[in-house]
Image (cartoon, rainbow, N blue to C red):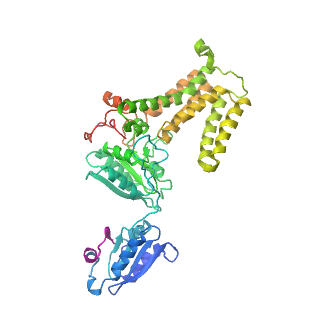
Amino acid sequence: MMEENLSGQWAGDLAALRRQLRPDANFDILERRLWIGGREAYFYHVTGFVSDINVQRILQFFLGLGPEQIPGTAEEFLARDTAFGSVQLETSVDKLVTAVLSGLGILLVEGYRSGLVFDIRNYPSRGVQEPDKDRVLRGSRDGFSETIIANTALIRRRIRDPRLRLEIFQVGTASRTDIALVYVEGRVQEPLLQKIRKRLQTVQVDALTMNQESLAECLYTHRWYNPFPKFKYTERPDTAAACLLEGNLVILVDNSPAAMVLPSSVFDIAEAADDYYFPPITGTYLRITRILTALVALFLIPVYLLLMQNTHWLPEALSFIRPAENVNVPLVFQILILELAVDGLRLASVNTPSMLSTPLSIIAGIVMGDFSVQSGWFNSEIMLYMAFVTVANYTQTSYELGYAIKFLRLLLVVLTSLFNVWGFGLGMAVMALAIVTNKTIAGTSYLYPLIPFRWREVKNRFFRPRLSHRYPEPDADSRRGKSC
């Protein structure tokens, strides 16, 4: 479809713009008729997206111009008579329409073949309060919001390097969602930058209905069945800034408070900001605790089920872990029911009004806990272990990584119940295959620096290093031990 441009024919240009904007059918798209130096002009904007004070100032300024102040071309008009911060010329009708729908204001003046685009956006947004998911014990208390301009400003505030680059793209035939690609020139891996930039320019999608998740599925379309996350998500500007300084790319999606960090290995995704807001010894303790807790959350229930199916393996010292009561429900079904019940309670807590959160806690803790044991449905031992596993899952900063651990745990449980020790071994093999064959979006190993093995980087992953102020090498083998 050929792009339509302004022709300089006043009636035709107005008709082309009105045909798409339909100010007569949309109450929030305002069309203001003006007379500027004896010439007819129209100003378009979306109410609620712009600053009313800036609109008033623009209109007052142009209404005060005389005929002698109106030059013959839009370029001269822009150079002489537009004393505003961000103004540019645009000839494409489609781009002018997109500008209006994005919150910009456009001015069409009779006789000009270009429209003037004013950046007077003032999106409705919430504050930059600390995100609920990425809380820290110590450190910055601000977080990203749903406005992309505010989010880029939070990053720019932390990185005052002139090499910080923020490229803007629009993705989605219908939504035309603003996407910001953020990186530090000279630190980012150039092949990765070119690859992501090309994908953003060529992605074919109708709309990013689910914001960054829709974009993630467009950028990484392979192996959807692998549960391990391909991107690191953060709602903290300090974490995003630290990742940028380590040579990563950050993608911001308008209407989403989460930033995508790439490429991301499993060690990148498992990191937390608290590791770096405390001294190295404390940060190392927190990091090792998180890793060990994740391993226990993955293997505790499957190993317990395996031992209960082979009680003759238990030494006398561990005989106390056998269930004390005989219940009517087989152990594997108890585990599966509780796994589903935990997620059901999580969904219920999300959708429960705050005023009803206390009754929900009472029902979950007393009725579904104590009474379910007394009724003969569940063993008290399996309730205890499932409670620990549920809490352990919350130690992960990434929801996606927590659910990957859950899915693998369920796989181990099912295979162990069906094939005993051979099923457990098969589940371990499937799990190892899933994580080893997984790749980052840059094509590097998901387990770097374990594969390929780099002792110095492995040490930095498990033991929090002192914060380095050196510039990273942009052509380094892969991810470094870093503070993001």
Residue 315 is at least partly visible in this image: no
Span colored in magenta? 76-90
Residue 348 is at least partly visible in this image: yes
For the point 37% across and 58% down, the residue is: 169
Give the x, y percent position of residue 281.
Answer: 37, 30
Q: Does the magenta stretch include residue 79?
A: yes
The answer to whether 96 appears left or right of 126 in the picture is: left
Residue situated in front as seen by the camera: 77 or 90: 77
Height in image: 118 above or below 422? Answer: below
For the point 62% across and 21% down, the residue is: 308
Give the x, y percent position of residue 144.
Answer: 43, 52
Give the x, y percent position of residue 280.
Answer: 35, 32
**Quadrant housing the C terminus:** top left
Height in image: 91 above or below 302? Answer: below
Give the x, y percent position of residue 255.
Answer: 46, 57
**Quadrant housing the N terminus:** bottom left
Height in image: 147 above or below 103? Answer: above
